[in-house]
Image (cartoon, rainbow, N blue to C red):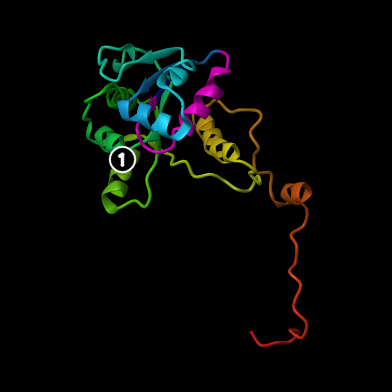
C-alpha cells in the first residue's frame, strides 16, 4: 500500500509526526513524504525537530519543487494521500487545480484518479470563502478532516488528543489500528469511569424556586 503525506506550514506539526510514526510500524505500507519550506519552519518552531528527523520516518521523501517525482503522475499507483496539517493556502490551491508545487500536484492527481484525499485543515474560525472551498473539495471527492479531538476516552495528555484525530485518519485510509480506543456506548463508559457524580444541594435549597 502506498500513502502520500503532504506537510504544509499550518500550525500542528505534531500531527504528521504522530501519523508518520504510526505508519512506519505498519508492514506493507510505503510512505511518500513531501514537506514544504513553511512546513519545515513550523516543525522546528513547534517541536524543535529538523526536517531530516521527519524525513527519516518515510520510505521516500520528495522535494517540494520536484514535479517530475513519481507521485506527480496518475500512472504511479497510490492508495491515498493525507495533507497534515493542511493550510488554507494549500487547500485553496488544490480546490482550484493550481499545481504550483508537488503537494498540490500530488493531491490533484489523487483526486483525478478517484483516490482518497484527506485534508486535515488547520484554521479557525472559517469564513464563508473557506467553507465554500471545502464544499467544492468535498464535491470533488476529497475528505475534509480537521483535527478535532474526541474526549469520550478521557484523554490524559496532548499525545492522546493528537492521536484521537490520527486514529480517524488511519480509519479513513483503511488502515485501522487495533489499539484505537473506540466508543462502546454509555454502559462501557460507566464501567470504565464510574457513574457520574451528583452535585450535593446546599442546605435549605429543597423546594426552592428555579
Residue 55, image quadrant? top left
Q: Please identify the quarter of the rendering in which residue 195 is found.
A: bottom right
* Circle 1: element type: helix
What x and y, as percent, mark residue 74?
31, 16
Tell me the residue at 39%/15% (across/down): 61
Q: Which residues are magenta?
A: 6-27
Rendered location of residue 153, percent (x, y) = 65, 44
User: Could you say where residue 70 lies in the image, as x and y percent from the top left?
Assistant: 32, 11
Which residue is labeled 1 in the image?
Answer: 88
Q: Residue at x 73, y 87 (%)?
A: 207
Q: Nearer the viewer, residue 134 or 126?
A: 126
Query: Label 1: few (<14), some or many (≥20) within 10 Å?
Result: some
Residue 84 can be seen, yes or no: no
Q: Taking the image as drawn, is residue 14 in sight?
A: yes
Residue 102 left/right relative to 31? left
**Residue 163 x, y percent position in the rendering:** 56, 35
Compared with residue 19, is residue 199 higher up or lower down, i.e. above or below? below
Q: How many marks?
A: 1
Residue drawn at (51%, 16%) of the image: 29
Which residue occupies 60% across, 48% down? 151
The question of residue 2 being in magenta is answered with no
- State the quadrant of the C terminus: bottom right
Does the stretch in magenta take in 14?
yes
Amino acid at each position: 500500500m502506498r500513502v502520500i503525506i503532504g506537510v504544509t506550514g499550518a500550525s500542528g506539526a505534531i500531527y504528521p509526526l504522530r501519523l508518520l510514526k504510526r505508519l512506519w510500524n505498519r508492514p506493507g505500507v510505503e510512505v511518500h513524504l513531501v514537506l514544504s519550506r513553511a512546513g519545515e519552519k513550523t516543525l522546528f518552531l513547534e517541536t524543535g525537530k529538523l526536517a531530516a528527523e521527519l524525513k527519516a520516518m518515510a520510505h521516500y521523501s520528495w522535494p517540494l519543487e520536484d514535479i517530475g517525482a513519481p507521485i506527480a503522475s496518475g500512472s504511479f499507483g497510490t492508495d491515498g494521500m493525507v495533507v497534515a496539517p493542511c493550510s488554507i493556502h494549500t487547500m485553496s490551491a488544490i480546490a482550484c487545480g493550481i499545481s504550483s508545487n508537488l503537494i498540490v500536484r500530488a493531491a490533484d492527481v489523487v483526486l483525478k484518479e478517484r483516490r482518497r484525499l484527506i485534508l486535515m485543515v488547520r484554521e479557525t474560525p472559517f469564513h464563508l470563502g473557506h467553507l465554500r472551498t471545502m464544499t467544492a473539495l468535498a464535491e470533488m471527492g476529497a475528505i475534509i478532516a480537521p483535527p478535532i479531538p474526541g474526549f469520550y476516552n478521557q484523554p490524559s495528555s496532548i499525545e492522546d488528543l493528537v492521536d484521537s484525530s490520527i486514529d480517524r485518519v488511519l480509519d479513513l485510509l483503511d488502515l485501522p489500528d487495533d489499539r484505537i480506543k473506540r466508543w462502546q456506548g454509555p454502559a462501557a463508559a460507566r464501567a470504565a469511569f464510574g457513574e457520574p457524580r451528583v452535585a450535593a444541594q446546599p442546605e435549605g435549597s429543597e423546594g426552592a424556586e428555579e
